Amino acid sequence: MATFFLIRHGTTAWVDQQLLHGITDIPLNDNGLRQAAQTAEALRGISAGRLLSSPLTRAMQTAEIIGQIVGLTPEPVEGFREIDFGWMEGKKIRDDTMEDYPLWLERCDHYWMSFVRLVSGESLQRFQRRITQEWEKVRSGNGKENIIIVAHSGVLGVILESYLGNSLRGNKSYYVSYPCSITEISVDEMGRCIPVRLNDYAHLSEWYPNGH
């Protein structure tokens, strides 16, 4: 049985302004750096053999701060890079991870973004295939070693969807990961997934006073 700690990177100026960034390489802002430090403290004392990260700056910065606490050097993994949103990069969006919108509106956003990615960026199908292939390489090449993965909300969502389907995502069309939240899953030798915690942000009370 191996345990995977899936961490979304800390917040950035674009996240705070609800500007869409996939492959655009925006660093953490001061809030993001503090979130990363608090997440590192929340992970202090865990036993992990590897620390993998998306190569984008916001993820690598988060991973480096975590690595200082858990005693691991981040390994950049190209396949865990966020999706290319094409000409929607840098555009204002509704952040339905932080506010509830009607389901029909979330669905409209979802299909509109899928179209934009298809014609000007990376299609959802290609993105899902890339992440699934990279995740399978990590999982199948691992024994019983615990691994920390720092990546993006889209990347973590694909990993969770591949194991859990829509069973634990509530009324959302995807799995929500807040900046620097911790998702913990265990995977047995047969590839069966046991969710331990999803989108846990209890250690980030400065930003989420009602966290779980």
Image (tube, grey):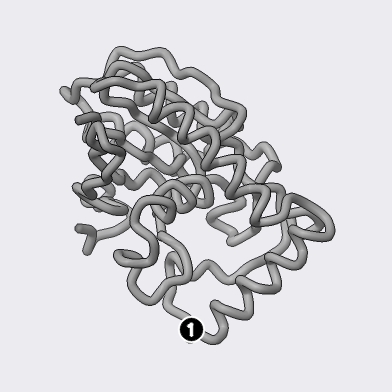
Q: Amino acid at mark 1?
A: Leu
Q: Quadrant of residue 168?
A: bottom left
Extreme-front residue of the structure? 190
Q: Where's residue 43, x and y in %?
A: 23, 31
Nearer to us in this view, 59 or 3:
3
- The residue labelled by disc 1 is 103
Q: How many marks?
A: 1
Q: Is residue 211 above or below residue 62?
A: below
The outermost residue toward the left is: 45
Q: Residue at x 61, y 28 (%)?
A: 78
Position of residue 87 in the picture relative to residue 84 (left or right): right
Depth check: 92 or 174 in front? 174
Q: Where, quadrant-wise, is the N terminus in this rendering?
A: top left
The residue lying toward the viewer, choosing from 161 and 92, is 161
Which residue is drawn at the image coordinates 57% and 83% (left, top)?
A: 105
SS state under label 1: helix
At 55% from the left and 25% from the top, the residue drawn is 77
- On-image quarter of the C terminus: bottom left
